[in-house]
Amino acid sequence: RRLVLLGDSAAFSLAEQFDPSIAPSWDVQAVVQVGCPLTPGVTMDAGSSTPNPLDPNCVDWRELWPAYLSALDPEIVVVMIGAWEVLDHRVDGRDIRFPSPEWDELIATTLASAADAAAETGVPVVFFDVACMGGSSSNPGTTARSDPARTAAVNRHLDDLAAAREGLTIAHVSTVVCPTGVDGLEIDGTPVRYDGVHYTSVGANLVWPWVFEQLERIR
């Protein structure tokens, strides 16, 4: 039985710390690109006109995901995105700011394309909702990521997507890592995401058992 996790560096931080003893019958594989948003163009923090650096190794995930999914032949696909998508965007020289109809359209169309690519092999697809973020000011996009209105907006688009598509489910990981709805760093004093976005080993060991509980309900 195989689960493939698609996403960015946050997904990588979760996947690399998967403890196989949590679900011995499952093989977990990750297809991730670090520093690569799903949206076209470049991203910017709220109130900034300076683009965040884009990793030169980023490739088109619309081709990458289906190719790897075909090769890996998973039983289920999990998609974990959001850290880049909540930001402002510059596409073909045009700034797309939150909140605006243009921002909503960009996010909605990007998520729809992501759902298409993730469902390429016909197996069930689960999107994590976007959990609260915050933490280190050295992270690009900290102001935007700390804005609950932005995470809520992306999550509304995810809910709309799931309502319109058979075989697509939203798993609310935010209820696990953000039980109070704010602060992505700690739960009861225990660090779960070391910078408010990327998982610690403790955070990963908190999330993975919950993931497999959700998968049993979906199946």
Image (cartoon, rainbow, N blue to C red):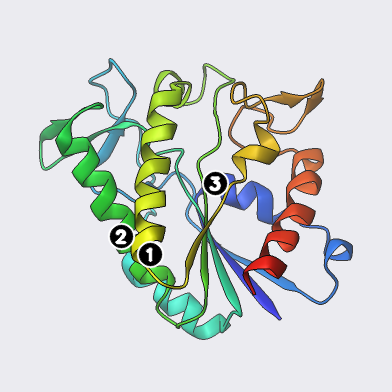
Lateral position of residue 13 relative to residue 132, left or right: right
Residue lying furthest left in this view? 93
Q: Which is more N-terminal, label 2 or label 3?
A: 3
Mark 1 is on which residue type? Answer: Ala
Percent x, y of residue 81: 47, 48
Q: Is residue 98 above or below residue 168?
A: above
Residue drawn at x 85%, y 72% as measured from the top left: 24
Asked if 207 appears above or below 132 in the picture, the reply is below
Is disc 1 placed on a helix, strand or loop?
Answer: helix
| Dot 1 crowding, Cα within 10 Å, few <14, some 14–19, many 20+ | many
Relative image position of residue 128 (x, y in whole percent):
54, 51
Q: Secondary structure at mark 2?
A: helix
Asked whether the residues under the numbered discs 3 and 2 touch, taking CB atoms below 8 Å apart as contact, a structural biologist would say: no
Which amino acid does the dot numbered 3 rest on? Ser
Q: Is residue 164 left or right of residue 187?
A: left
Q: Nearer the viewer, residue 69 or 168?
A: 168
Question: Circle 1 is placed at which residue position?
Answer: 115
Corner quadrant of residue 45: top left
Of residue 163 and residue 171, the one placed in the foreground of this image is 163
Q: Which callout, 1 or 3, points at the residue further toward the start of the chain?
A: 3
Residue drawn at (28%, 29%) of the image: 51
* Dots 1, 2 in contact, CB < 8 A: yes
Residue 9: which numbered mark, if any? 3
Kind of element beneath mark 3: helix
- For the residues labelled 1 and 2, the Cα–Cα distance comes to 5 Å
Residue 219 falls in image quadrant: bottom right
- Proximity of marks 1 and 3: CB atoms separated by less than 8 Å: no
Give the residue at mark 2: 112
Is residue 85 visible to us here?
no
Of badges 3 and 2, nearer the viewer stands 2
Numbered disc in front, either 1 or 3: 1
Three-letter code, disc 2: Ala
